[in-house]
Structures are given as C-alpha cells and as structure tokens.
Image: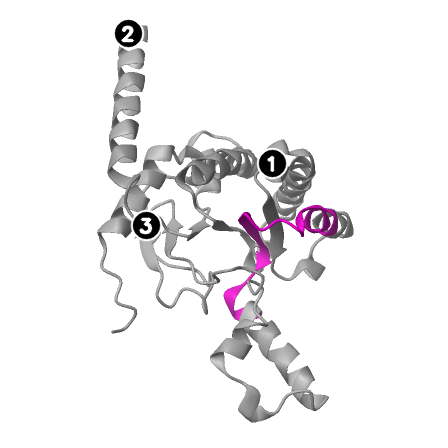
Amino acid sequence: MLKGFLSIIGAYKLYEKWLWYQVKNSVKPEHIAIILDGNRRWASEKDLEPWYGHKKGAEKVEHLLEWCMRLGVKSITLYAFSTENFQRPKEEVEEIMKIASEELQKILKDERIHKNKVRVKVIGRINMLPEDIQKLIVDVEKATQDYSEHFLNIAFAYGGRAEIVDAARKIAEKAQKKELKPEDITESLFEKYLYTSHLPKQEPDLIIRTSGEERLSGFLLWQSAYSELCFLDVYWPDFRLIDLLRAVRTFQKRKRRFGT
C-alpha cells in the first residue's frame, strides 16, 4: 500500500514538472482572480462541520500565494465571502469570522508578505464586518500600503452589484457637491471608484472557479468583461499546484481578441 502511495506521489510530481515546463516560457496572467468555492461540500463529504472546510480552504490560500509568486503573477483577487453569505447559519458565520481574524493576524506577521512586498487589501462592504475584524483590516492594509511588487486582494463581505452601487453613490455625492459634471463621467472615471482602483490592472486576465460550478456569482462584474474563465471540478481545499498550472495553460492557449 505504501509503495502504491509513493508511486502516486511520484506520478503527481512528474505531471507537475511537465505542466510547469509547458507554461513557464509563455505569457503569464498578470492578474488572476479565484472564486474559492466548495469548502462546505468538502467538509460535508467528510462528515465534518462546514467551518472545517473553511479552515482548510484558508490554509490553501497560503500555498496559492507561494505558487503565484513562483509563476510571477503580480495580482491575486480571492472571492472568500459574499454579502449574501451573511444569510448562512449564525454559528457558521461566526466561525468564518474567527478564521478570518486568525488569517489576518497571520498576514501581519508573515515574512513572505514583507519580503515580497505584497500589498494586501480587503475589498467589500467592510462596515458589515465585526469591529475587531475591521480593525485588523486597517492594521494589515496600513502595514502593507507602501508595497507595490505584488497585490493580494481579499473579497470579503463583497458583492459585485454592491461594488457598482457604492461607486455610483460616491460619484453622485461628488456631482451633488458640484465637484463633477455629468459629462465628466466616463468608464475610466467610474473605474477610479471601484474597490479595485488601487491595482495596476483592475481586470483579471484569468478567473478560476473551483467546485464545478460554472457561474461568477456576482464576482467582479465590471472588471470581468474580457476575463478568460476557467471552471475546475475540484473543491477549493483540494486545489493543487497542477490545477493552477492547468488553468494557466488553458489561458495561454486561448486567443484574446477583446471584442475586435
């Protein structure tokens, strides 16, 4: 049995190296966005409470960051918790908030974040979150605000429609104060009021969704207009480097015309 297990590990490593060889010299996505889906189903299939899946999924993000660094990806945007997710059972939401708190505290101390100069930002309706998490978010963003080598965006209490509404509201407030004229409002101006306005490239080149579901669920509605989409039949906690490499390889094989 052990021999068979070692054989599987060896085959996995060979496949990983082969995939790496295929993608390493081609154009890499500058901005990858991922919908981290399947945590609860992963836990359910193992007869575990949902938050064990969320915990495992949070641990997987740490590996993802390392893999994207190796690939030379500049920006990563992760869809972790939507505004609709607040409607889940109270105990599950509370456990998710505990996990979020733990992960934010880890980020503050993570040497990789500072060594690689990763700017971390939480995007969404932060005011909907518990006050202790809001404070942690401020601390993390302040500690990394001067970094610009890489960008890690965590969509938490996020909704794509909410983002567009919030941007429109800010523009309306400017117009009400006569700081903007109607004719000043263009697509490029609108983008300055999105949650992702701090990024060098707001539009993801590649959006990955795990768990087998094939929809965006409101993720980056404005920014995803010309993103390449890749849907993987693997739960997020089981996501592997080969899954990332396969998605990047798929991206590299597509011809991007941007409507032309």
Residue 227 vs residue 155: left or right? left
- Residue 151, magenta (yes or no): yes
1 or 3: tag closer to the N-terminus: 1
Q: Which residue carries the number 1 mark?
A: 115
Q: Position of residue 177 (x, y in %)?
A: 73, 88
Q: Residue at x 23, y 55 (%)?
A: 254
Q: Amino acid at mark 1?
A: Lys
Magenta residues span 138-162
Q: Position of residue 167 (x, y in %)?
A: 59, 74
* Camera-nearest residue between 28 and 16: 28
Kindly identify which residue carries mark 3: 231
Task: In the rendered structure, find residue 239 and report the number of the disc placed on it.
Answer: none
In the depicted structure, whether residue 138 falls above or below residue 239: below
Q: Residues within 10 Å of mark 3 (few under 14, many from 20)?
A: some
Q: Of marks 2 and 3, which one's residue comes earlier in the chain?
A: 2
Amino acid type shown at disc 2: Lys
**Crowd class of label 1 (few under 14; some 14 to 19; many from 20; radius 10 Å):** few
Regarding mark 3 in the picture, which secondary structure is present there?
strand
66 in the magenta segment: no
Vertical relation: 185 (above or below) 90: below
Q: In which quadrant of the rendered view does residue 21 lie?
A: top left
- According to the image, label 2 marks what residue? 3
Q: In the rendered view of the protein, which quadrant contains the N terminus?
A: top left
CA–CA distance in space, label 1 to label 2: 39 Å
Compared with residue 178, is residue 57 higher up or lower down, i.e. above or below?
above
Q: Amino acid at mark 3?
A: Phe
